Amino acid sequence: MQSYFVTTPIYYVNAKPHLGHAYTTVVADALARYHKLSGEDTLFLTGTDEHGDKIVQAAEKEGKTPKEFVDGISARFQSLWPQLGVANDRFVRTTDEQHVRAVQKFLQKVYDAGDIYFGEFGGHYCYGCERFYTEKELENGLCPQHQTKPEFISEKNYFFKMSKYLPWLREHIERNPDFIRPERYRNELLGMIDSGGLEDLCISRPKSRLSWGIELPFDKDYVCYVWFDALLNYISALGWPEGDYARYWPGEHLVAKDILKPHGIFWPTMLKAAGMPLYKRLNVHGYWLVRDTKMSKSLGNVVDPVDMCQRYGQDAFRYFLLREMHFGSDASFSEEAFVGRVNADLANDLGNLFSRVLSMCAKYCDSKAPEAGPLNDDDKAIAELSAGALRNFRQLFGNVQFSQALESLWELVRALNKYVDAQAPWALFKQGDQLRLGTVMQVLLTAMRKIALCVWPVMPQASVTLLRQLGQETPDGAAPAVSLEAETEEFALLTPGTALASSSNLFPRRDMPAPAEAPAAEKKKEKKEKKEKAPAAPAEGEITFDHFKAAVLRVGTVRRAEKHPDADRILRLEIDFGEGQLRQILSGLAEHYAPEDLVGKQVCAVLNLAPRKIRGLMSCGMVLTAEKDGKLCLLQPADVMPDGSVIA
Ligand code: MSP
């Protein structure tokens, strides 16, 4: 059986896990599940990085010993992951005995091979990064990460002959286009090597300065540099040189762009020096921003993944993460974008498909998979579409293009919804054409089953529920026992008589959250400005400029329009205000405009009216109209404006 080994970075234990840590770990979990679903012998590793100055300082702050401190936080990481549906097979800690032994063994091996030497060294040390910077690497004399002045430290240390391996590494990266992906990070690494700024790596710290680390096996006055120690987790967790090492190594790594250099330069040269095979692939993703701003404690915009899962469910959260970020690029998080995506893709598309098909099966087929007749051209087109969608899904998913993989699966979901409309099973039922009705339902159920299987890596809980609703036996906690390849190429209908659920309501529509408050820093600035130019009190019947400014008025384009299912005079509009997702606004326009005439039109609207429910649907804003003799006329900008343009 083919083996597959995937890792996340091991996270520092000086901060609480946030959206960024959750993303990498959910991606690794999804990849591991995907390979399990493909029948491979899979191992998924995550863990915590527990040595270094930062830990000592954080422990001191809490009045704990470093060990007490790391035990507490590492436990917090371990208990977090199941709440996100993450099922790692192993958890490594750099304070594990097994890890310490492996690091010492590795150091000795490289030392014996003559690739570690002792030398005098002076360098610019950044305490934040826990590393030395060369003159060239500094930006205006400051650490490029922290923008602080590093301290010049001169001391005797041990060095790894990294520069000796750089020409070889360059060639390896050139020759193996898949070794580092996506391509932009491969180019970044080649640029780093070509810049000539890389030297030998200082891999020790004198104990007199730092004692919380792994002692060098060849000099008890020194401990190992944290990165040299941390990178070895990927093999120590396998029990290197024995244990599962031979079974799973080499594997592939997932990291964000912040730690490209240690993974793309230090780690492969370390492996080469020890005469070991290199990892198969380094997959590098971008950063999650929050409303286009870096997440930070001081801005108060750190997104808590557990809170999101508790409020919206782990499946919806995982789906959003994988669908929204194009692997390799940065992505922006906002709760509005999240709710918009979940409503559109999960409630409207997937949820609606399951809900309508299962309730039709209850009405027309006694909640049992029916007998089917021969497939006509429409049915065969769906079977072909299904094969194409699954082929693309598998190719893209394995290529870490999760967003595109899900999009290709959703093309099938949307095609099935259209197929329902076109085949009109309710009409076939009325006509008493039971065989054709059975065929249509079987085509739908068969394709839905394949979709439910494919989403298992992304939405494990929902996948199991959907499969069970389709009467499919599904093991608890393990991958569904199927062959994805066979599922792609064959369109085998459900066994007639299979018991189906009579309804499905897995993804309810969510209300759009109230517009987010400005971050604390911005609010403070606004308050100060307000105080400086306090306006004169308004006269009776007037409003101040601040009152007017409080209304968020924007231009948007109507993308979808339809009648409210339960209110004759109301249209349900989905409007693009440049927010990254469509906003739903209900408007009393049904007697004045046909829905199809509104699609593509620009409108002006107030966005920060408190959302309200009208006959079961939420309206998040108000479209502006003018009225004459009871006739409503939409207000529009005189020229076509970009969506989201401010009205003032
Ligand atoms: N301990 C080192 C890694 C050693 S691996 C041998 C470390 N730890 S960390 O806690 O800082 O984690 C960094 C990783 O967390 C990133 O590479 C990424 O996986 C994840 N993220 C942290 N913030 C992130 C975002 N804002 N966006 C996306 N992922 C980010 O570095």
Image (cartoon, helix red, strand yellow):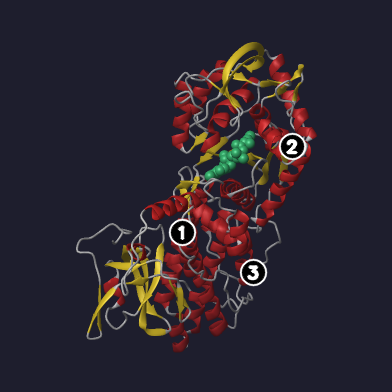
Q: Secondary structure at mark 3?
A: helix
Determine which of the numbered discs, if any, sits on residue 468 in the image: 3
Q: Quadrant of the C terminus?
A: bottom left
Amino acid on which the number 2 mark rests in the picture: Asp
Q: Look at 51% across and 28% down and name the residue there.
A: 143
Judge the density around disc 2: few (<14), some (14-19), many (≥20) Cα neighbours within 10 Å.
some
Residue 522 in picture, x, y percent from top left: 45, 51
**Residue 224 to residue 466: above or below:** above
Q: Quadrant of residue 244?
A: top right
Residue 267 located left or right of residue 217: left
Q: Quadrant of residue 162?
A: top right
Front-lying residue, 449 or 462: 462
Q: Which residue is mark 2?
A: 244
Label 3 CB less than 8 angstroms from ligand 1: no
Front-lying residue, 248 or 75: 75
**Residue 102 to residue 34: above or below:** above
Q: Nearer the viewer, mark 2 or mark 1?
A: 1
Amino acid on which the number 1 mark rests in the picture: Ala
Residue 129 in picture, x, y percent from top left: 58, 30
Looking at the image, is mark 2 or mark 1 earlier in the sequence? 2
Please say if the residues under marks 3 and 2 sit with CB atoms less than 8 Å apart: no
Looking at the image, is mark 1 or mark 3 earlier in the sequence? 1
Distance CA(mark 3)–CA(mark 2): 35 Å
User: Quick one: which residue is furthest to the right in this view?
Assistant: 97
Residue 373 in picture, x, y percent from top left: 50, 76
Determine which of the numbered discs, if any, sits on residue 21 in the image: none
